[in-house]
Image (tube, helix red, strand yellow):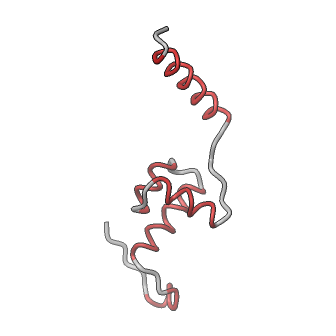
Amino acid sequence: MTIELPDQEIGNLRLTPEQVRLELAIGRYAGRQVSLARAAKIAGEDFTSFIHELGRRGLCLNYTVADVEHDMRMADELCGKASGK
């Protein structure tokens, strides 16, 4: 994808393409339009680095009660399989 931005609009921001990708990814994630994993891919970052960048910016992870319940069910299933139940 190619995006053209008029120089007068971004002026002295002096953003690299990598910084633009990161800003787009963080904006989409913060706006809850994409998942954490997808945002990291958009940014071109590994999962852990992306989470650290969110932390540096004081942004919280979008982790809902439904996410917790899903993770708990998955953990129960995995533990059950590991113990042979």
Q: Where residue 38 appears, x then y in whole percent?
A: 44, 50
Q: Which residue: 60% across, 57% down?
A: 30
Q: Is residue 5 left or right of residue 33?
A: left
Q: Is residue 26 above or below residue 6?
A: above
Front residue of 78/45: it is: 78
Residue at far front of view: 83
Q: Which residue: 50% across, 54% down?
A: 48
Residue at far left of view: 1
Q: Is residue 24 above or below residue 6?
A: above
Q: Where residue 6 appears, x then y in whole percent?
A: 43, 85
Q: Is residue 64 left or right of residue 11?
A: right
Q: Where residue 76 appears, x then y in whole percent?
A: 56, 20
Q: Is residue 36 above or below residue 57?
A: above
Q: Where residue 67 appears, x then y in whole percent?
A: 60, 35
Q: Which residue: 63% across, 50% down?
A: 61
Q: Residue 57's quadrant in the figure?
A: bottom right
Q: Which residue: 59% across, 61% down?
A: 54
Q: Is residue 64 left or right of residue 73?
A: right
